[in-house]
Amino acid sequence: MIKKVLALIAVMAASAFLFVGTSQAATHTVKKGENLSILAKKYDTTVKELMTLNDLETSKIQLKQVIKLPSHIKNKPAAEKKETKKSATDPSNVKKTIKMTATAYTANCKGCTGVTKTGLNLRKNPSLKVIAVDPKIIPLGSKVWVEGYGIAVAGDIGGAIKGNKIDIFVNSKSTATKWGRKQVTVKILKS
């Protein structure tokens, strides 16, 4: 009788161990585009460990196949490293957005020195992105994004630049002519 009780206790203990072990095991159902390499990276393990755990002879897996994961996983993927840097024009980096009329200018016009109001020498630095502004609208030195032009500095003023008008710097007269006069969105960026 004691032998039967001990045998029954042993079977119950083994069953409990197996039940707990399988209920705690983490699994993953394969989705479209996933392979063992992707899963190994996602769950911070190795392809070899996944193959061994799942009795796989090759690294090929199928859509909707249930893959056992190592016990340290507990159904949580490894933390993904995300780039936290935001683009310059992300709304959290923009102080103000304004619709403006934009024309273009060069540093080589008649009577021009090529030096901006803030001291930038555009003849020596023809690749600079600079705009002329009305300082009452956009303060000199502001970093801005101009639709169709990109990120620039408000580094110059102009006699005809009043109110919601800007003049973008380009390094050739033909480029200035191509630009013409257009309505653009200007975003004043946070420093």
Image (tube, rainbow, N blue to C red):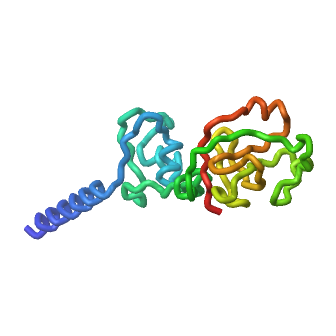
Q: Nearer the viewer, residue 111 or 33?
A: 111
**Residue at image coords 43%, 48%:** 53
State whether residue 84 appears in this view: no
Quadrant where the C terminus sits is bottom right
Quadrant where the N terminus sits is bottom left
Please state if 131 lies on the left or on the right of 114 as rendered.
left
**Residue at image coords 42%, 60%:** 72
Please state if 163 lies on the left or on the right of 114 as rendered.
left
Image quadrant of residue 61?
Answer: top left
**Residue at image coords 88%, 40%:** 109
Looking at the image, is 177 positioned above or below residue 44? Answer: above
Q: Residue 69, position in %: x, y?
A: 41, 51
Looking at the image, is 163 positioned above or below residue 14? Answer: above
Looking at the image, is 104 positioned above or below residue 124? Answer: above
State whether residue 56 appears in this view: yes
Q: Residue 118, position in %: x, y?
A: 81, 60
